[in-house]
Amino acid sequence: MSPRPVPRPLAVAAALLVAAAWALHTPAAAQPAAASFAARIEQLSEEGGDFDTDNLISNERSFLEVIPALKAAAGTGGAYIGVGPDQNFSHIALIRPSLALMLDIRRDNMLEHLLFKSYFAVARNRLEYLCLLFGKPIPADIDKWTGRSIGLIVAYLDRTPVDSATVAATRQASNERIGRFGVPLDAHDHEMIDRYRAEFVADGWETRYSSLGRNNRMDYPSFGQLLMATDRAGRQLSYIASEDAFQFVRSMQLHDRIIPVVGNVAGDRAMKAIAQYATEHHLALSAFYLSNVEQYLITRDGGFDAFAANVKAMPHDSTSVMIRSYFGRFGATHPLYVPGIASLSTSMIEPVDGFLRRYASGSIRSYPDLVFSGYVTP
């Protein structure tokens, strides 16, 4: 459902106030040359494709369960590559790469990342970011909320209703900010950005992933469950769980070091362009987050050989890792599976060198071969 219409004078006044606040609270570092950001997207992207999901958020409740193994195995700095939306931010906050590339075959994913970037451009802390995302009024003492516990932030959002004037003002200011990023967008692009914005406002914490044409939305975790997810030791480690994690991701966004790229992991342009860029800038791969993309490459779409060649071409070292997920649809529970509410997935990491050795030896003949061997035990 959509917010109630806002009386025009109130909407205009709110829009002016929000626009002024966005200009006032945008640090100089958050206003780089738009051409460099847009040009990098153009340089690294290829023609987009379709996938049968409405991937507004992740469907992997297990995405933080890899944190202990990831922290032990992966290096810092370098280049991070990840498919999908904001679950990547939590991995980025841990690994602290020099550059992060949000690679996805769906152009819509790039558009969603532009929406996130517009909010990071002005959000001084986690509460302000979530208020913008959910269409809720920002408290007058917002600066005092920096560093407050996630519990207090959740409590404020739970007791504060959506405000239609705030929604309208934020929409206008966000769209203006997105326009300043310099990325060419058509009417369909703007429509999709508005749709994503409206879904977060309408559903809030209950925003969920769904597969197109299938009634499976409630099989997957909510946005709130993902942000409050824990690692295997029960620690909350999402990018919203701590101010330090959020501020690192925000700094990456402000300095144009999170770049959304339209591309196929098995394609012949985007991955090659990324490898060339990383080579030229002396960036080794830190982590490659794939979700369960490899499942489709092996079982449905083909292209696994091309994907493996693309991985091999990426600059990497002994600390480079792959992060993947398994959804247990091949008749066996994974040894790393952790039972839990709304948890259908198992997440794991594998060193890139180990994956390439297994591929070269011919030992990856099926998807179970891929996910039931080679993983790092936490």
Image: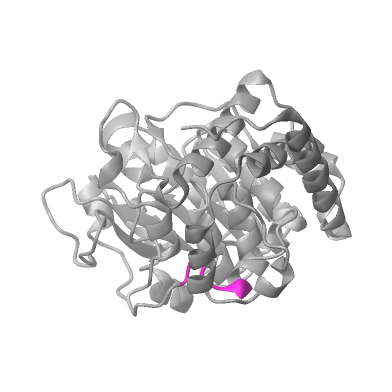
Q: Residue furthest left?
A: 331
Most prominent secondary structure in the magenta stretch? loop
Q: What x and y, as percent, mark residue 260?
A: 63, 43
The stretch of residues the image draws in magenta is: 237-244
Q: Quadrant where the C terminus lies?
A: bottom left
Q: Residue furthest top?
A: 187
Residue 146, position as x, y percentages in the image: 67, 73
Q: Is residue 239 magenta?
A: yes
| Left or right placement of residue 353 versus residue 162 in this view | left
Residue 71 point in image, percent of width and height: 47, 76
Left or right of 343? Residue 31 is right
Above or below residue 298? Residue 292 is: below
Looking at the picture, tell me which residue is in the foreground, 118 or 182.
118
Q: Residue at x 26, y 36 (%)?
A: 299
> What residue do we see at 67% from left, 65% from top?
125
Examine the image and state in which quarter residue 188 appears. top right
Instruction: Name which residue lies at 15% across and 46% down.
Output: 330
Looking at the image, can residue 184 be seen?
yes
- What's the colour scheme? one colour
- Residues 155 and 373: in front is 155
User: Is 87 covered by the magenta stretch?
Assistant: no
Relative to 79, 302 lies left or right: left
Number of marks present in the image shown: 0
Is residue 151 or residue 174 the one in the foreground? 151
Residue at image position (44%, 43%) is 203
Q: Is residue 109 visible?
A: no
Establish if 324 lies above or below 265: below
- In the picture provided, is 80 more to the left or to the right than 50? right
Q: Quadrant of residue 257?
A: bottom right
The image shows residue 265 at horizontal and vertical percentages of 48, 40
